[in-house]
Image: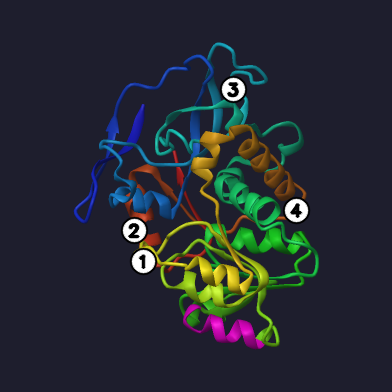
Amino acid sequence: MQAFVVEQTGEHRIMRLQEGPSPEALPGKLTIDVVYAGVGMIDSLLSRGYLGLQTPFVPGLEVSGYVRAIGEGVEGFRIGQPVVALTLTELGGYASVVAARPELTVPLDGPLEGLGMERAAALAVNAATAYLAVKKVAQVEPGQHVLVHGALGGLGSLVGQVARRQGAALVLGTVGSAAKRDAASGEIKLLLRGEFAEETLRLTGGKGVHHVFDPVGGVTRTRSFETLQPLGRLILLGNASDEADTELRLNEAWLGNRAALGLNIGAYAAFAPDAVGEAMYQALAMAARGELEADIYGVYPMAQAERAIGLLEQGGTTGKLLLRI
């Protein structure tokens, strides 16, 4: 098989397309001939040494393709079946063949037949994360107000959409530049990230929002906490900015009647793969019904994986980037 391998992490990372043996369908696993792989900021962070993964490794959290082989004990799949899978616990998505857990693999025939492999790969991990964040972690209720950081990104855009479908009355979103804010259209009111705290309070009559969803990290964390209503929740979804951790003092949570909750879908998938697989299915079913849209910024050949990651790092993209394997 071919795979795009991170050979060295850090400032001078080395990433190359390589040939290697295909993974086998071990007991409890299946293998997939990959058609599309999703590209996300986590791939950038990992290639820069975030989490300190041992090299070499193949990045990639989500793929779509066809079932290649089925391991012993795996039921409910057939050879050649179109599927989408999360490779959260093993990575490996930037490859022509990948091993996957059946709990984190969803058939793309039947109810999801019209979704298509490109859209499925663009939605998989972000839609599952958005579904869990809005419905299970924040437990957004009809009529509530929410704020989403990185609102035009692959994850942020879906968090806003799921919140709307959940009945949120006001969805505010932040972006990093006036160009992004002015060029966008849709159901989310966009604010500049540097002005979001003041604007959020102004737009809510000084009350603040019920929930803030933050995949960006850095100083937005503490300022976001200040925009929450009593009993409001700050949902931590990532650290795309790669900034140093920030402190939230527990007495401020107590005195302000606010909470900070984290959702790391990779760690949750290792703990509860069935729950994450079900969230992915439900989110993809919403997309198949036309309730969620996949904003695809671009599709690149696997050999250009480093270019795709670089585009994300430059901060000029909106929506999701894919590799065509």
Q: Residues within 10 Å of mark 2 (few under 14, many from 20)?
A: few
The x, y position of residue 188, in whole percent, is 66, 72
Check the image and name the residue furthest to the left.
Answer: 12
Task: Say whether disc 1 or disc 4 marks the residue closer to the N-terminus.
Answer: 4
Circles 1, 3 touching at the beta carbon (< 8 Å): no
For residue 197: magenta?
A: yes
For residue 48: magenta?
A: no
Question: What residue is shown with label 4?
Answer: 290
The x, y position of residue 267, in whole percent, is 49, 41
Circles 1, 4 touching at the beta carbon (< 8 Å): no
* Callout in the foreground (3, 4): 4
Q: Quadrant of residue 281?
A: top right
Residue 314 numbered mark, or none: 1
Vertical order, 58 against 216 (above or below): above
Task: Say whether disc 3 or disc 2 marks the residue closer to the N-terminus.
Answer: 3
Region of the chain picked out in magenta, as a range: 193-202
Q: Amino acid at mark 1?
A: Gln
Vertical order, 293 against 64 (above or below): below
Is 153 left or right of 23, judged from the image as shown? right
Q: Residues within 10 Å of mark 4 (few under 14, many from 20)?
A: few
